Image: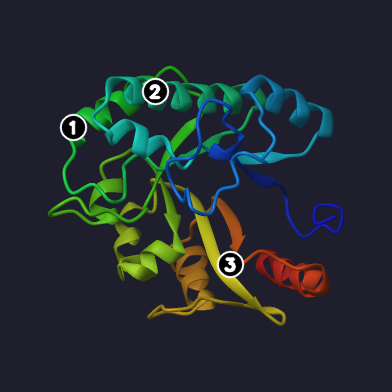
Amino acid sequence: MVFRDSAVDGFELQLEPEWDGENPPLTDAELADWAETPKFTFREILTLLREQRLPVLSIHASRDVGNYLCSGRKGDLEKGKRLINDSLSLADDLGTEVCVFHIWDTWKTKFDLNNLKKVFLDIASQFPGVKTSVENIPTHLKHYTPFSLVEQFDFVTLDLRWAALYDELDKFESVIDKVVNVHLRGRLEQNNWVLDRSSFSFQEALDRIANRWRYPGLLTVEPEGGVESPCYDSFIRAMKSLKN
């Protein structure tokens, strides 16, 4: 319906760890209903998307990737590698140019950053047609912030909520040429987008990114708390306002 109403140009596909038939999610496990959630292989997802013919502009790999890569267990490392490879393969098959990753465990205070980069970039190099983008998720790695981590990669996803949490939005101007996806994380209030617990407003951030920095790439809206049916018309108006 959102696509039909011309409110968006396409979608970001979130590959949920709840779809994984091998084991329950590692992240947000207390919120996951793994036992009841249908399971899908990457091949089945590809088939479904081709049948629906929806424009998938970006793919968001499983949020568990970073936990597997940083666990210190060989079996987990191999699964993390496989998830990266399968996500990029899916993007490549669909002709989707951007694939977003959480590549570190947000709670780890120590991990081998150089090895993490090598593992990630070695797989990414096999898919030159896909921009393997690293999101500025929180970190507890000593002496680092989300920005100081993502600036080391070729492609970046800027999430407004995390930039607000660490008060790092202005830092992204220096790497705007690397940014290929912006997650506009906000709450819908009537017909307007609201960014809570932030030193800048949703509109101020959008103006800075799109107008002052002249960012030309994807803008992905992630409504806080989702959108209930009674709010649908307001959601459509708010979405259309971003295209103006």
What quarter of the picture does the N terminus occupy? bottom right
Q: Position of residue 119 (x, y in %)?
A: 30, 24
Q: Is residue 81 above or below residue 166?
A: above
Camera-side residue: 81 or 182? 81
Q: Element type at marker 1? A: helix
Q: Is residue 78 above or below residue 53?
A: above
Disc 1 or disc 2, which is closer to the eye?
2
Q: Residues within 10 Å of mark 1 (few under 14, many from 20)?
A: few
Camera-side residue: 182 or 188? 188
Instruction: Identify which residue is drawn at 44% across, 65% down.
Output: 161
Q: Which residue type carries mark 2?
A: Lys
Q: Do the residues bearing badges 1 and 3 touch, measured as CB atoms within 8 Å?
A: no
Numbered label attached to residue 100: none
Among numbered discs 2 and 3, the one appearing first in the sequence: 2
| Tag 1 residue | 114
Residue pushed farthest top? 126
Q: Position of residue 151 (x, y in %)?
A: 28, 47
Numbered label attached to residue 81: 2
Q: Which residue type carries mark 3?
A: Glu
Instruction: Identify which residue is drawn at 55% across, 21% down.
Output: 89
Would you say 24 lies left or right of 153 here?
A: right
Camera-side residue: 176 or 95? 95
Q: Position of residue 137 (x, y in %)?
A: 37, 53
Name the colour scheme: rainbow
| Tag 3 residue | 224
Instruction: Identify which residue is drawn at 52% across, 64% down.
Output: 210
State the separation of the CA atoms marked 2 and 3. 30 Å
Quadrant of the rendered image containing residue 39: top right
State the separation of the CA atoms marked 1 and 3. 34 Å
Q: Is residue 127 above or below residue 112?
A: above
Q: Element type at marker 3? A: loop
Among numbered discs 1 and 2, the one appearing first in the sequence: 2
